[in-house]
Image (cartoon, grey):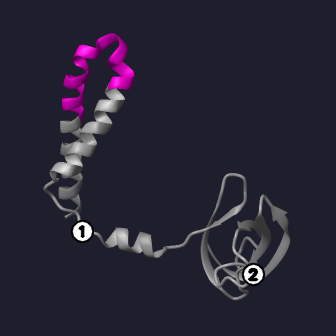
Amino acid sequence: MQGTIKSVTKNGVFQEMGKYYVEFNHSQGEKVLFFSKSEPEDDNFPLKVGTQINYELKPNGNGKILREDNFTKGFNKMPMTKKMDFTSISIISQVCYKANKDVFGKEYNDKVMDYTEADTKAMVSMINKIYEETQ
């Protein structure tokens, strides 16, 4: 959802976070409760009247501000490489081995490596397929 802030009203504290009711200039016209650890002098919160923000409503009805921080921007701009390197495949193998060992280790320990190899190949294949589809 997107809305322009009409008013911000502080409504106490909950677990060291400030509680703020924010009213928007849009069709819903209702107040949404947001929580913030930010101090009032923080530029991000409490939000200023007139600011347009993107937010979502959580299942409990409280609001969550959707921000694109520097990490998210950088991650989204990272190029994907088609050929997976040894380190990536090694990490996938270790995760598959751990999962197979946990699930099958007690009763079928002799099959753990076979399952791990099959799962690793499937994961690498899936990742390469996703790469090809996005190019």
Residue range highlighted in magenta: 101-119
Above or below: residue 51 compared with residue 76: below
- Residue 3 is situated, as x and y percent measured from the top left of the image, at 65, 78
Residue 12 in view of the camera: yes
> In the shown orientation, is residue 55 left or right of residue 128?
right
Q: Which mark is residue 34?
A: none
Q: Which mark is residue 79?
A: 1
Q: Could you tell me which residue is drawn at 69 percent across and 78 percent down?
A: 45
Q: Quadrant of the N terminus?
A: bottom right
How crowded is the residue under tag 1: few (<14 C-alpha within 10 Å), some, or many (20+)? few
Q: Could you tell me which residue is drawn at 33 percent across and 18 percent down?
A: 105
Residue 30 in view of the camera: no
> In the shown orientation, is residue 10 left or right of residue 72?
right
- Residue 76 is situated, as x and y percent measured from the top left of the image, at 35, 69
Q: Could you tell me which residue is drawn at 23 percent across and 63 percent down?
A: 80
Query: Principal SS element in the magenta part?
Result: helix
| Quarter of image, res 30 | bottom right
Above or below: residue 90 compared with residue 40: above
Q: Residue furthest left?
A: 83
- The amino acid type, in three-letter code, at marker 1 is Pro
Question: Is-magenta flag for residue 80?
Answer: no
Q: Quadrant of the C terminus?
A: bottom left
What residue is pinned by disc 2?
40
Above or below: residue 101 compared with residue 74: above
Question: Is-magenta flag for residue 109?
Answer: yes
Q: Is 68 or 28 nearer to us in this picture?
A: 68
- Dot 2: what SS? loop
| Quarter of image, res 5 | bottom right
